Image (spheres, helix red, strand yellow):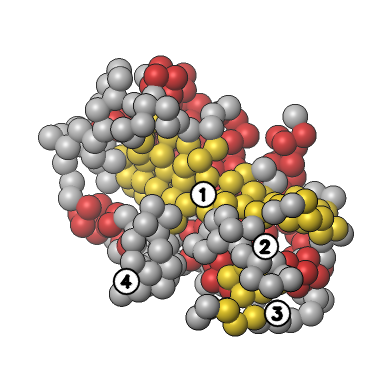
Amino acid sequence: MLRRCLLLSFWLVGLASIGDKADAADEWKLIPYGGLKYVSAANVKSFYRFTELEEKGKKLIFKSPNLVMEWEINSQAIFINKVKFVLSFPVIKPTYRSIVSVVDLAKLIDPVLRPSYIKHVGKFDTVVIDAGHGAHDSGAVGVLGYEKNYCLDTALRLEKALKKRGFKTRMTRSADKFLTLGQRVQVANSVKNAIFISVHFNSSDNRLANGIETYALAPQGTTSTNGGRASGFRKGNNRDGENIALATAVHAMAMHRMGVEDRGVKRARFNVLTGINKPAILFEGGFVTHSGDARRINTAEYREKLASTVADAIVSFRKAVGGASKRR
């Protein structure tokens, strides 16, 4: 129950005070190392006015009344109010100081902790919903069914849930139809004042793999969570802060409600994300190749709950970034 309360306070209550306090903090003290720039854990504690920084072996725990952030030396996984995030570069301790890359600080940690400070936020009243795969492209072949069918059913349920909450919607597909990734991007980019969510379900050769993960576009010059070159990529939609805040809102709400394994908020350069000109995420609602996940995914109740959860998370996201224009 404590974990759930922390999640709710994190996205619905606790962020405004963090932003107000951080404004008065010292500037970042940059530390060059290995061709990158880093910031110390102590500097992070000071800037965000955490009340305590505790070190337990390789773990660093930042504490405030409504916020707990955990790092681990030599790991790319961090936890913010028990929600998992995967950094582009690991937290390291090359000398006596633990440090985090400036890229991860600017592109992940800060927009997650202070969504109302994200720059270039535009108002939106529409959600473009992309049901993955379709027609001859079945997607993952699961224990009990095809990914393409689960994607479409969940996307249609999400469309209804969003309309009930006052949003306009645009579907990339509303039937068992094939669209190229380029066509999906073209549909998304044709809609003004919108955000984009691509709905998928996961698969793995490892039949034990399970849970939910949420992807935002990897920032320029970083590797994807699942590997890939760090350079030579275009900027994509250039909405890094909004992307990660949207991913956080959806993923945190899913962890609060769905009772499944937390595989984290991750970054990747999926083709359906790189060309989008608006805030965008790709959501993986579980593994069709895992016996437990597959049974849940195969039920209308699970897909309905998933759709309702994502819709509520979008409401939360709009509230969280709503003060950005005032902060700027």
* Residue 203 x/y as whole percent: 33, 34
Q: Amino acid at mark 3?
A: Trp
Residue assigned mark 2? 114
Picture residue at 74% right of the left edge, 71% below the top: 96
Tell me if residue 275 comes above or below residue 253 in the rendering. below
Q: Earlier in the sequence, mark 2 or mark 3?
A: 3
> Is residue 22 visible from the viewing direction of this image?
no
> Which residue reaches farthest left?
136
Q: Foreground mark, 2 or 1?
A: 1
Q: Earlier in the sequence, mark 3 or mark 4?
A: 3
Specify the quadrant of the image occupied by residue 37.
bottom right
Q: Is residue 326 left or right of residue 234?
A: right
Residue assigned mark 3? 28
Q: Earlier in the sequence, mark 2 or mark 1?
A: 2
Q: CA distance from mark 3 to mark 1?
A: 25 Å
The quarter in which the N terminus is drawn is: top right
Q: CA distance from mark 4 to mark 2?
A: 27 Å
